[in-house]
Image (spheres, rainbow, N blue to C red):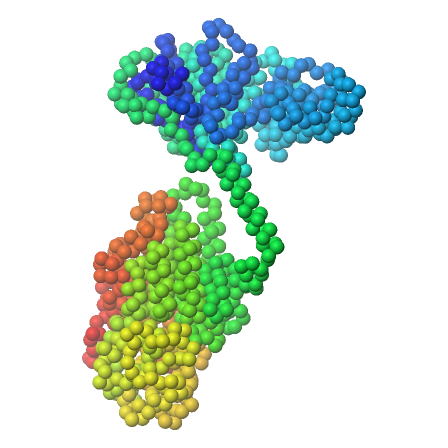
Amino acid sequence: MTSGDPQSRIPAYPGVERFIDAFDKLVVQPRRSRSRVPVVLLNEPDGGDAGRRIVTGLRSRMRGRSEVLAPHAYIPRLPDGTDPPPLELFEHLTHQLAETMPPGTGELRLHSYRLLRSVVTAPAIEGLMERRHAELRNHCYAEHRNWSRTAQTLWWLGGRDQASGGTLLELLWNFIAGPLFQRLPRALFGWRANRRMLGRARSRSWYAEWVRRQHGSPPTDFFRSALDLVHGELASEPERMDRVLMHALLADLDQACRPRLLNPWRRRRTSRFVLLFDDAGPADSRVQRFLRELRSAVEDLRCTSVFAVAGGVRSLASRIPDIDASGLAHAGAELINIERRGMTPGQPTGIVVPVAEGAEDDQAAVYWLGRWPTLVTPSPRWGPGTEVAGVFGIGVLALALAVGLFLAPNIGGAGEDDPCQGSTFLGTDGQCVGVAEGAAGFGDEPSERALRAVLQQIERQNEEVDRKLAGRHQYDPRPGRRTVVYFGPLSGGEDAEDPVRGGTLAELRGIALAQRHINTQALRSGERVPLRVLAANAGDRFKDASAVADRIAELAASDPSIAGVVGFGQSRRNTYGAIRTLDEAGIPMVGTSGTADELLRQGEHYYQTAPTDTRAAELMAVFASNAGMTTGGRKALRVSLVADTTDAYSNSLAASFLSSYGQERTDVLLYTPADAPEPGPVEGALGGRPVPTVEDLAREVCRAVNEEPRTAVVWSARASQFQLFLAEIARISGDCPKISVLGGDDVTNTLTEEPRPWDDFKGLTLYYVSHGYAPDLAARSPEAAAFLTSYDRVYGDDHSAGTEAMREDAHVALAWDALRYLAEGIDQAWRTTGGHDDRLDRGLLQGVLYQGLGGGGFDGATGRMDAHGAAGGGRLTEDKLLAVLRGGGDGTTTELLCGTVVRGDERTRWGPKGKEHPCR
């Protein structure tokens, strides 16, 4: 009967569309989200055939127009007053289920049911008690051969014995081949039957539990325990026979729905098995007795793969509680609720739905049934044969590749010694660069030990997040973790131009402290997103930044949990290329100590926390023009500006300072170190007088100070070059016993090392720019106070000069603010998902950051952070807090503080009381 036959159409009763919609959803519900489903009993107390017509329509709905859509069995109405043999109903069901398996889902195998059917149909077994279980096994194996071609073929290969009427030659062959082809497979059949029916843990086997209930102790051998089912009491108790066969059948059907790794046919079984009963009849009918055992077995086994609907229910027994529905619409609502939330333990296993003949022109039902005339099932893209061929092809290719590597192990450099692992690779300096998790690969140099300790701290914090989230179930409403990559130059050492114990080590400490602070809040509240941190080594002075950015983009493409990148603490041309790469990949970035104005022009996914070079240079010019920073506390009349035109940061800061301070009072000295990572001046390089060596640079500065004692040195080059410069000044200090230096923010990297700059040269008066001096801000800024508390909690027991100086280093606090900035964006993006964690991705995070964080920003450890987004003024803080500090053996003094400390507290003037100067 096809779906187009008028007799097979579902009648358009009121509410039937809601019932059919629930039926369809339960049939195709994914296996992992299934629970038990109650048996639907279409009650017809006043007679008629309304229920039977619905059941017939459901059968047609699953048969489709051209092929079967879901496995199902249909039991037609039995003649009145008949009670078929106990096994007939089971045989009818299993035969139809096997016949209606959809194409591509393989053959339905019911091992447990066939085994128990062989037991209950076995003839009476006589003989010694010790041999009866073996005779039962032999009988079951003989039945097994009737439907197993493999077993039948093996038995035929073993030949015929004397009992089978074999000839002398056949008897000889059976004597030789019988043990291998007959007795061994039969013994394996018995072993598998024991394993299947009793299980590894017998308490978990339904059959072992059933026997324990009957006899008080679990079975030790299946065939010994099954002797009671052979022409014994079971034959005179049809309910017991139904019970044991029903448990076996449902166990097989549940097993048939479980996918197997190497079985593409099993993976395509996406629908429940549907049992349809045309006419259940009165309370004591054969079908209703069958349905009662079905309901009990479904509850006992927690079976989720079977859905039964019975029509023509005349009356109901009171043996099992039911859910009473008022009609088809109510039943549909109950079933939808079960589909969404599942059935709770103890909930009734049947739902009684009263149906009666009536009008079949309900407009909602007619319209819905017209739109959805058949069941809609998932359709895989590839057939099982194609999948098998693909897997076979991949296997052949892998085997060929393995053979090729074995025969030619050095192909592609596989035999070369490469110490790098995971997503790291050898960089230009022979060090491992790229993305790594953990602290492997760092040596025992003092700077490397300190760096390794911070990376180990981050690794422990990552493991803590993973451990605390591991126990959550998949429907937990709290957000899952996200990963942030720190991008910085981890390579370097004691003799490197930019040692890791300077800016990079300070930034990593800030990242680790911020991660600890963020995760403490996230795991406590459940309303913030916990973070993991990976460290990406961009190489000494960002030499390998572009290649490492490519690797991060590849990882992010395969790992959606990577939310963004923080770092870029040095403004170099290679840094610009890395930002462009990550911008094209759509990865949000938040800068730490990078200050060049060009950083923001590399891509719209980059956001800056540090002040730009233009802003820092303006304040340096204001300070150099008004502060008494030269000998005798007098204002400087001239400035010697030291710059490196191959360094994007140095050239940017020096050019901005020259523009603000004026060229008339400035001598520009251009010095480039011999091992500059990016040789050749940057585009639009600053003009000035080239100085070939650091020794020549020291002589030029001393000459200028001798000619005009009120000359100040403005250092816009890197901190590592400043140390070499001071060493040369100290060597020729007789010519200039005292000099005053105003350094850019990078000079702070020299303050965390021993010896300090003023220890190298006693005549030094050092002023330097700081992006935030947390000890001065703590009284006004709760965030700065929280940062210092976190720092003291982790590093308070380390009283070394470098650690105490790093507490005041703005690199640490800036890294803290950068990760807090990105974390706040992630939290706000997660809130917009309505609690759907899978919707939180990098695109959504970029949208939140680009539009601006809620509240317009936050108070950071380095001052107020604007976060208005691109539309609200740019991706930076225009009036970012800046300080000029004076360092020395007697401590640190704040000479200038300009910008917004916290919301409502903006510093616009600086200097002694009564002699203030405007910040601009």
Left or right of residue 450: residue 587: left
Vertical side of 131 occupied by 439: above or below? below
Q: Residue at left 58%, top 53%?
A: 404
Q: Where is residue 767 in the image (x, y as percent from the top left)?
A: 32, 80
Residue 743 in view: no
> In the depicted view, which residue is nearer to us: 368 or 834?
368
Instruction: Please report the residue visible at 53 percent of the width from the left and 35 percent of the height from the top.
Output: 263
Identify which residue is drawn at 24% across, 67% down.
879
Residue 569's quadrant in the figure?
A: bottom left
Q: Is residue 108 above or below residue 279?
A: below
Which residue does the image show at 59% across and 30% down from the upper left?
Answer: 205
Looking at the image, which is closer to me, 757 or 557? 557
Q: Where is residue 487 in the image (x, y as percent from the top left)?
A: 40, 63
Q: Dividing the picture into quarters, in which one does residue 570 lie?
A: bottom left
Do we see residue 754 in this rendering? yes
Position in image of residue 833 (x %, y %): 32, 45
